Image (spheres, rainbow, N blue to C red):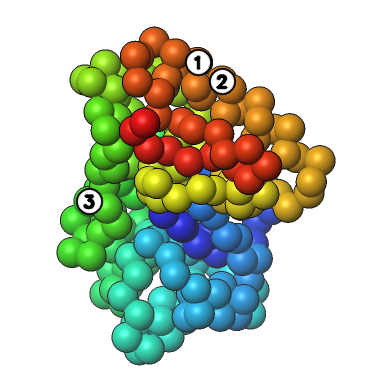
């Protein structure tokens, strides 16, 4: 699930990128209105977080261009202004929700999940491979009903494998999808993380789901 953040304040943008990535979302950040609009029109995003005060084109203009182009990606406005007329303007233009800065990240996350849940074409929420079940919106994984305690990266890695069951995924593909890195030197990260994941997902259970394909990568499937 991918989220576009259009925000010119570097600190806020970095905070959002970090928090959203840790919660399993893919994140693109645009630092001004025109770049944000271009990405919103050309990319595939499940949601857009849109600052109101932006260089080049303000958040309202970005939203109205987007809706005029028949793009109905849900939008959460971030506004430093708490005035009622600003909220009304945003909602009239077709925003789905708004948050007044400064906001608690947990609050934003709750709003995001609420909006994603009510989307008619919402992404698949539940992945099942054998007795493994992954709830993408709830960020929970279970095996045979037993809750797996996974770190955010472990969860992202497992979700990535489970979204393509039976398909061999290369280490470089996983590095790109989960860590957004392309360097060969990062492949150790993949190996290490897969080892940690196995300790939680496979070791306590008689059937092993994560299979190594020598020289290629990993595949998630029942044996
Ligand atoms: Ca701003």
The residue sitting at 81% across, 41% down in the picture is 185
Q: Which residue is mark 2?
A: 196
| Residue 25 drawn at (x, y percent) | 47, 48
Q: Residues within 10 Å of mark 3 (few under 14, many from 20)?
A: some
Classify residue 29 as left or right of residue 88.
right
Q: Are marks 1 and 3 in contact (CB under 8 Å)?
A: no
Give percent across and percent down for residue 124: 27, 53
Q: Residue 16 or 211: which is nearer the viewer? A: 211
Secondary structure type for disc 3: helix
Distance of label 3 from label 2 (alpha carbons): 31 Å
Residue 150 image-quadrant placement: top left
Q: Which residue is mark 1?
A: 199
Return the disc, 1 or 3, that comes first in the chain's sequence. 3
The residue carrying pointer 2 sits among few (fewer than 14), some (14 to 19) or many (20 or more) residues within 10 Å by Cα, namely some
User: Which residue is more in the foreground, 209 or 1?
Assistant: 209
**Numbered circle sitting on residue 117:** 3
Query: What secondary structure is found at the residue carrying circle 2?
Result: helix
Q: Is residue 113 left or right of residue 26?
A: left
Q: Please name the residue shown 27% across and 33% down the image.
A: 130
Percent from the top left, x then y, of residue 146?
A: 26, 16
**Disc 2 CB within 8 Å of nearest ligand 1 atom:** no
Quadrant of res 77: bottom left
Residue 145 to residue 110: above or below? above
**Quick check: marks 2 and 1 in contact, CB under 8 Å?**
yes
Identified at 69% across, 53% down, the residue is: 10
């Amino acid at each position: 699930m991918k989220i576009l953040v259009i925000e010119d304040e570097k600190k806020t943008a970095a905070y959002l990128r970090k928090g959203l990535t840790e919660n399993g979302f893919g994140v693109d950040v645009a630092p001004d209105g025109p770049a944000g609009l271009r990405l919103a029109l050309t990319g595939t995003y499940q949601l857009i977080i849109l600052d109101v005060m932006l260089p080049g084109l303000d958040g309202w203009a970005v939203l109205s261009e987007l809706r005029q182009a028949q793009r109905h990606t849900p939008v959460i406005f971030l506004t430093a202004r708490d005035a009622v007329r600003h909220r009304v303007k945003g909602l009239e233009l077709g925003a789905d929700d708004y948050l007044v800065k400064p906001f608690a990240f947990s609050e934003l996350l709750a709003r995001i999940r609420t909006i994603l849940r009510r989307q008619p074409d919402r992404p698949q929420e539940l992945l099942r491979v054998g007795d493994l079940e992954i709830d993408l919106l709830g960020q929970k994984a279970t095996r045979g009903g037993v809750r797996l305690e996974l770190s955010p990266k472990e969860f992202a890695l497992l979700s990535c494998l489970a979204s393509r069951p039976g398909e061999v995924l290369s280490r470089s593909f996983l590095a790109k999808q989960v860590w957004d890195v392309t360097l060969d030197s990062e492949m150790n990260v993949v190996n290490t993380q897969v080892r940690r994941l196995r300790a939680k997902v496979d070791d306590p259970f008689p059937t092993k789901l994560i299979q190594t394909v020598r020289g290629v990568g990993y595949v998630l499937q029942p044996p």
